[in-house]
Image (tube, grey):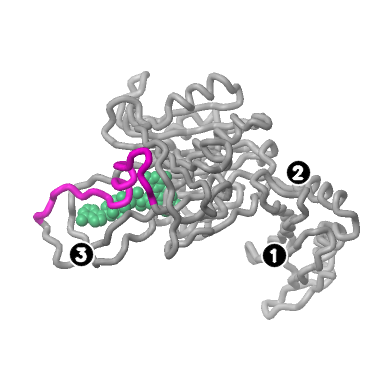
């Protein structure tokens, strides 16, 4: 049973002990304060019976969440406890496994729009003992001549623990050969998967990423560096990866990341994917997984908002243009920042496009089914958050505390957003 106990701050808080497994599932109850007045209550049920595994063959994690008021009044606290009990494992455990699962599904569908994420396997291959992958292909993925060099890199990882164990949204590590300036082996660099969870080959044996060469002029990085040295600086791992040819070997690790994932119940949600540069990598895989799945293409509304400096820098443009033609529920929007728009207005970043054409996105963003994914440069996150707040649709995607909570969104900046905005479970952010 759930037991109320009295805390030092004068409020009743409710706690649930771990329940024994009776339906082949593990239950956890997390209760945390989200404001002085409210507690977030979340039941997490990890279903481990063989018939309740997700697409990737992993146990399914289901969440049921809601809030109850914190109260210094015993009766009110007991009312909250009754509410928790009405949803809690006690009720679920009383039924047989199949009914229990259906109950949880119904609850999550009707009462909750929190995405249910699959349980991702993590770090099966460590940096200390990387495995060897073999390059399958390494082709340019920009259209024609572009100022940047970006390649779609496919790696055969068959026979390694990574085979069939990576979920789209996760990243994998690459270790470049050789030593760094301190004479130590190069550190792992992470690269987002750009293919569906079933890989490029449909069998989980070939993974891919989108690799951008880091090419800059040298600048002093520390004391003693020559300020007049402005020769080219070539990023170690990105250039190593981009140089590889089919048949070459590469040391890989991972997988990494457990939150930036597609939900288990794909059709229960609609999607806004916002990307700039190589931030498109996970969205290529996610959109392919949603639309080109051999089982059944998703019927959800899917919008991709892709930013690039020039039209020639748009990555996988032909793929997305083709998918938008084939699927009425897929909408491909591009924001080009350094070219004048067709109507003569100046170029725009992704958040400007969201702002200027908000009417096209308002129904999507106002729908509690929608999940927003943001991937790419850190600055893009603050721009998107500002735009959502300015149009009054931030609720559900992120929460703010002081100083953001008391400031006009037009006055927000990257530092403040980093410090005082927190993405909710309906907003997944991966910026680097
Ligand atoms: C979760 C995650 C996913 C990622 N996914 C991708 C992806 O899909 N595709 C992708 O391309 N990248 C991705 N990255 C970034 C990637 O991990 C690497 O950081 C990137 O490729 C650069 O690595 P590098 O070894 O080439 O550069 P490094 O050699 O590590 O250099 C990194 C930076 O150091 C600076 N620097 C160092 N020395 C100097 C100097 N003397 N003068 C001037 N500047 C200097 C430069 O600004 C340079 O950009 C991801 C990162 C994360 C965290």
Residue 190 inside the magenta-drawn segment: no
Q: Residue at x 72, y 55 (%)?
A: 65
Q: Is residue 236 magenta?
A: yes
Quarter of the image for the N terminus: give it: bottom right
Task: Specify whether 432 is left or right of 395.
Answer: left
Q: Nearer the viewer, residue 41 or 25?
A: 25
Pointer 2 local density, CA inside 10 Å: few below 14, some 14–19, many at least 20: some
| Residue at horizontal 79 percent and vertical 73 percent from the top | 4
| Mark 2 Cβ inside 8 Å of ligand 1 | no
The image position of residue 391, as x and y in percent, is: 53, 39
Which stretch did the figure color magenta? 228-250
Give the left or right position of residue 235, taking residue 230 as reference.
right
Residue 297: x and y in percent read 64, 29
Is the residue under label 3 in contact with that under label 1 (CB below 8 Å)? no
Q: Name the residue beneath numbered marker 3.
A: 222
Instruction: Point out which mark residue 30 bears.
Output: 1
Mark 2 vs mark 1: which is more N-terminal? 1
Report the mark closest to the observer, 3 or 2. 3
If you read the primary sequence from the N terminus, does the residue marked by circle 3 or circle 2 appear first? Answer: 2
Where residue 158 appears, as percent x and y from the top left, is 51, 46
At label 1, counting other C-alpha atoms closer than 10 Å, the crowd grade (few under 14, some 14-19, many 20 or more) is some
Mark 1 or 3, closer to the camera: 3
Q: Residues within 10 Å of mark 3 (few under 14, many from 20)?
A: few
Residue drawn at the location 35% of the way across and 26% of the way down: 143
Residue 145: give x, y in percent of width and height: 27, 27
- Which corner quadrant of the image does residue 39 belong to? bottom right
Residue 212 visible, this angle: yes
- The reply to whether dot 2 and dot 1 touch (C-beta < 8 Å) is no
- Nearer the observer, 138 or 352: 138
Residue of label 2: 109
Q: In what element is the residue under mark 2?
A: helix
Task: Estimate the spatial distance between the alpha carbons at disc 2 and disc 1, rounded to whole Å.
Answer: 20 Å
């Amino acid at each position: 049973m759930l037991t109320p106990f009295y805390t030092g701050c004068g409020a009743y808080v409710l706690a649930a002990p771990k329940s024994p497994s009776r339906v082949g599932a593990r239950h956890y109850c997390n209760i945390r304060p989200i404001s002085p007045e409210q507690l977030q209550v979340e039941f997490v049920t990890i279903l481990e019976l063989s018939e309740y595994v997700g697409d990737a063959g992993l146990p399914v994690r289901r969440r049921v969440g809601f809030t109850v008021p914190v109260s210094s009044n015993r009766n009110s606290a007991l009312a909250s406890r009754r509410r928790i009990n009405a949803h809690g494992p006690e009720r679920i455990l009383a039924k047989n496994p199949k009914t229990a699962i259906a109950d949880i599904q119904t609850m999550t569908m009707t009462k909750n729009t929190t995405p249910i994420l699959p349980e991702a396997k993590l770090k099966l291959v460590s940096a200390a003992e990387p495995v060897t992958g073999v390059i399958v292909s390494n082709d340019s993925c920009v259209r024609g001549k572009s100022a940047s060099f970006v390649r779609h890199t496919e790696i055969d990882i068959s026979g390694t623990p990574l085979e069939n164990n990576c979920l789209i949204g996760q990243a994998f590590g690459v270790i470049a050969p050789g030593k760094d300036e301190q004479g130590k082996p190069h550190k792992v660099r992470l690269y987002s998967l750009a293919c569906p969870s079933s890989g490029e080959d449909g069998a989980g044996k070939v993974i891919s990423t989108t690799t951008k060469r880091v090419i800059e002029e040298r600048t002093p990085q520390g004391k003693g560096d020559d300020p007049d040295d402005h020769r080219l600086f070539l990023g170690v791992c990105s250039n190593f990866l981009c140089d590889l040819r089919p048949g070459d070997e590469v040391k890989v690790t991972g997988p990494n990341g457990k939150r930036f994932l597609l939900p288990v119940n794909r059709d229960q949600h609609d999607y806004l994917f916002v990307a700039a540069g190589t931030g498109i990598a996970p969205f290529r895989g996610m959109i392919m997984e949603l639309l080109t799945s051999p089982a059944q293409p998703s019927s959800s509304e899917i919008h991709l908002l892709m930013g690039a400096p020039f039209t020639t820098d748009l990555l996988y443009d032909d793929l997305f243009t083709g998918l938008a033609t084939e699927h009425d529920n897929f909408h491909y929007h591009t924001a080009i920042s350094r070219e004048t728009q067709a109507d003569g207005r100046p170029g725009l970043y992704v958040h400007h496009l969201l702002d200027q054409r908000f009417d096209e996105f308002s129904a999507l963003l106002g729908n509690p089914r929608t999940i927003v994914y943001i991937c790419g440069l850190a600055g893009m996150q603050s721009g998107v958050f500002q735009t959502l707040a300015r149009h009054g649709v931030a609720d559900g995607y992120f929460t703010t505390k002081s100083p953001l909570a008391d400031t006009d969104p037009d006055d927000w900046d990257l530092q403040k957003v980093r410090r005082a905005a927190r993405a909710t479970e309906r907003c997944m952010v991966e910026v680097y």
